[in-house]
Image (spheres, rainbow, N blue to C red):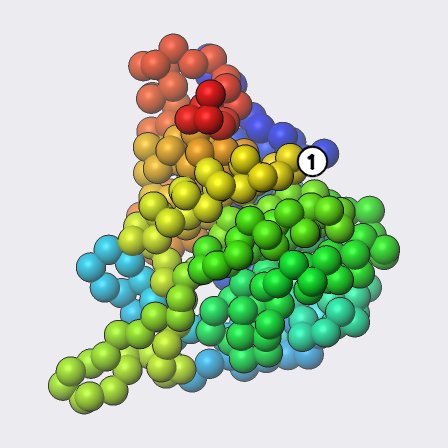
Amino acid sequence: MINLEIKINNLKLKNPTILASGILGVSSASLNNVVRNGAGAVVTKSISKEPRKGHPSPIIATYEEGMLNAVGYPNQGSIKASQEFSNVADIEAPVILSIIGQKEDDFKAVYNELKNCNFKAIEVPLSCPHTPGYGTMGGQHTPEMATKITKTLKEITDLPIWIKLSPNENLVEVGKAAEAAGADAIVAGNTMGPGMIIDIDTYKPVLGFGMGGVSGPALRPIAVRCVFDLYKAVKVPIIGCGGVTTGRDLIEMMMAGATGIGVGTAVLDRSVNVFSQIMKETEEWLKENDFKKIEDIIGLTHK
């Protein structure tokens, strides 16, 4: 029997797969469905203080080996979210709350509204490439802002804080600053970009916002390199995210240094049971290569 369990901070996961924020995390029911289909943990859709409509449609476009999206953080706001996610303790896997804000006080306000919902950790994306005022477009992907936002949340909660980074630039510097400020894990990373696809028949960009973040298999080599670089620079666990679709992809990311593995676009490619599929493929490889515990492959490339 192969031991597929991993531990991130004080959280025990039955396997390393984690539903990435923004994919199916809109309700307790949808999160529970993902867990029933094999995910080791799940992350909510990002929640802001006030409700947001997000960007105009179309919000998603696919191309040869990837996807472009500009969703724009649509969500019901923290008050309604506290009602929707009031029963996440019933879900049989850790549920992580994703928080966004434009100012440090926004992050505090969202957390305070949802602090009684039994979330097991907080994910903080500083890295969205396509939403004005947030992430890279809001000037948040800097060592200074990572320090301020991390410290703001560490002052008001004992929950683990996961800082989600951009693969675009200064990733290691921001990751080190977040760790120094008290971050308990680093998520590497968000979508890359922004990128653009133009419809040559209408002469216009295909996305309603014009540009969007790049995800899917086309992003995976960049994400693997980001994890590899961070593993050498920080001591906290790394959640690798970007283009993981198969068991071999998961193994590659873990060898680069990831402890947990975010899965997002693959849900659209292989359906919601992609988590079970990935872990079946992973377990087969581990057996063939005489590994007894999946944690033994973490950082193997560095050794």
Point out residue 173 in the picture as x, y percentages from the top left corner: 59, 52
Residue 35 left/right relative to 48: left
Compared to residue 159, the image places residue 204 above or below, namely: below
Residue 263 left/right relative to 126: left
Q: Quadrant of residue 146?
A: bottom right
Secondary structure type for disc 1: loop
Residue 22 left/right relative to 110: left
The amino acid pointed to by label 1 is: Asn
Instruction: Look at 64% across and 79% down and name the residue there.
Output: 51
Point out residue 223 in the picture as x, y percentages from the top left corner: 41, 48
State the residue position of label 1.
Answer: 9
Point out residue 268 in the picture as x, y percentages from the top left corner: 34, 56
Q: In which quarter of the image is residue 150?
A: bottom right
Compared to residue 125, the image places residue 183 above or below, namely: above
Q: Which of 136 and 116 is in front in this view?
A: 136
Point out residue 84 in the picture as x, y percentages from the top left corner: 67, 64
Q: Quadrant of residue 192?
A: bottom left
Inspect this view and state whether residue 189 appears. yes
Instruction: Look at 20% across and 59% down and name the residue there.
Output: 64
Task: Give the number of callouts.
Answer: 1
Q: Which of 297 and 302 is in front in this view?
A: 302
- The residue sitting at the left extreme is 201
Residue 98 left/right relative to 1: right
Instruction: Look at 57% across and 68% down and name the residue there.
Output: 135
User: Dot 1, how many residues are within 10 Å of its Cα: few (below 14), some (14-19), or many (20+)?
Assistant: some
Inspect this view and state whether residue 120 appears. no
- The residue sitting at the right extreme is 155
Instruction: Look at 69% across and 62% down and name the residue there.
Output: 144
Q: Which of 183 and 156 is in front in this view?
A: 183
